[in-house]
């Protein structure tokens, strides 16, 4: 479903008030006197049309920043370089600069180091901006596109993400169909929508095969090697019985490999391991990792395309969902690996 992300312009206000654009500008700037009745009509038109003058809209086109902001949670792991590559390539083609601000995922930005004062629009990665700040930017009609995150209730902000649920279900179905029954799932960071949807896919695949969900098989991997390593180590120490691990993402699978190796559990003979994303190292680790290929770079490109549409006053899609595909390699112990 397409929505047009437009708001009232200064020319709309002028038309509504029956005055010239120059008169509206004078009322907004407040520096040059305007006839009282005209000023009143302009103020009334502004109120009725819910017109919010953006700083960028008040400047000449030549004085636009020509910069797009990218707000990230902590930049780490093999996922982010792919996303950045897609964003930078698409922005470069469009002649825009990129301004990046990263913040640790457990400390979302409360103040606005980048925003309407130094960029023409924002790309926002999941959990990196407070809902209140997203709402504030939305209220002033500042162009934004969210990646891997649903906007707050009632806010029509474009979202770009991948088929997390379907991809996860494909993985878990594949494991079950090849004899695995006790499948560990490692959750991603708290509040991360990718993790929420992957867990739904995991649960749906279990249910489809009449395997009861077991909370003892779910732990936190945080999409992080070290966290995943300790999670699997603890499950082994606690005597939890499992024959497969869905690591949550490819980065976490590295920690899973290490913990299993230390415990002298063979992959895939004793424990099958699967990831998600299909980042570069997945085919080179030993054994090569069965995973889901997510078009990470294309998510970055698409986010830029949708943001540029907003900046040009064109239509932007409410939701773009990129397809994922199963990539079978040796780590799941299946005969038809590539």
Image: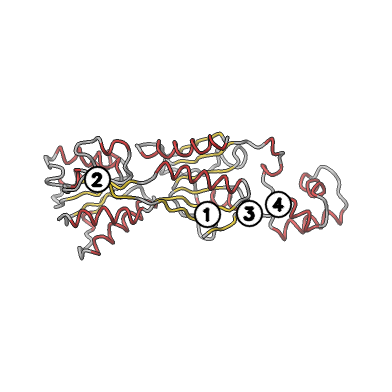
Q: Are marks 3 and 4 in contact (CB under 8 Å)?
A: no
Taking depth in this image into account, of 23 and 325 the one nearest to the observer is: 325
SS under mark 3:
loop
Identify the residue position indicated by label 4 in the image. Answer: 9
Mark 3 burial class by Cα count in 10 Å: few <14, some 14-19, many 20+: some
Q: Which element is circle 2 on?
A: loop
Task: Report which quarter residue 206 is drawn in.
Answer: bottom left
Q: Residue at image x 80%, y 45%?
A: 30
Count residues near mark 2 (Cα–Cα under 10 Å), then give few for <14, some for 14-19, many for 20+: many
For the rendered model, the colour scheme is: secondary structure
- Badge number at residue 317: 1
Left or right position of 120 against 25: left
Category of crowding for the residue at label 4, using alpha-carbon neighbours closer than 10 angstroms: few (below 14), some (14–19), many (at least 20): some
Q: CA distance from mark 3 to mark 4?
A: 9 Å
Q: Secondary structure at mark 1?
A: strand
Vertical side of 189 occupied by 76: above or below: above
How far is mark 4 from mark 1, CA to CA? 21 Å
């Amino acid at each position: 479903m397409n929505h047009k992300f437009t708001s009232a312009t200064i020319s709309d206000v002028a038309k509504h008030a029956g005055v010239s654009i120059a008169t509206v500008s004078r009322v907004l700037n407040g520096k040059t006197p305007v006839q009282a009745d005209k000023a009143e009509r302009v103020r009334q038109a502004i109120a009725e049309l819910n017109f919010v003058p953006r700083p960028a809209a008040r400047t000449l086109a030549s004085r636009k920043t020509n910069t797009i902001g990218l707000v990230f949670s902590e930049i780490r792991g093999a996922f982010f370089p792919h996303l950045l590559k897609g964003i930078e390539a698409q922005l470069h083609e469009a002649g825009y600069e990129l301004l990046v601000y990263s913040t640790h995922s457990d400390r979302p930005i409360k103040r606005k180091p980048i925003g309407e004062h130094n960029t023409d629009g924002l790309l926002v990665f999941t959990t990196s901006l407070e809902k209140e700040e997203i709402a504030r930017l939305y209220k002033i009609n500042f162009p934004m596109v969210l990646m891997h995150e649903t906007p707050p209730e009632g806010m029509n902000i474009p979202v770009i993400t991948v088929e997390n649920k379907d991809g996860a279900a494909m993985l878990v179905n594949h494991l079950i169909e090849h004899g695995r029954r006790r499948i560990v799932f490692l959750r991603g960071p708290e509040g991360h929508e990718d993790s929420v949807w992957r867990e739904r896919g995991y649960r749906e695949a279990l249910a489809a095969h009449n395997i009861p969900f077991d909370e003892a098989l779910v732990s936190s991997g945080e999409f992080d090697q070290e966290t995943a390593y300790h999670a699997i180590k603890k499950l082994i120490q606690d005597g939890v019985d499992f024959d497969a691990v869905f690591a949550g993402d490819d980065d976490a699978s590295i920690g899973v490999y290490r913990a299993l190796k230390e415990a002298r559990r063979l992959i895939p003979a004793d424990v099958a391991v699967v990831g998600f994303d299909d980042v570069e190292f997945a085919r080179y680790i030993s054994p090569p990792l069965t995973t889901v290929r997510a078009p990470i770079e294309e998510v970055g490109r698409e986010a830029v395309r949708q943001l540029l549409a907003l900046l040009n006053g064109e239509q932007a899609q409410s939701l773009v969902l990129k397809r994922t595909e199963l990539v079978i390699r040796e780590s799941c112990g299946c005969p038809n690996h590539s």
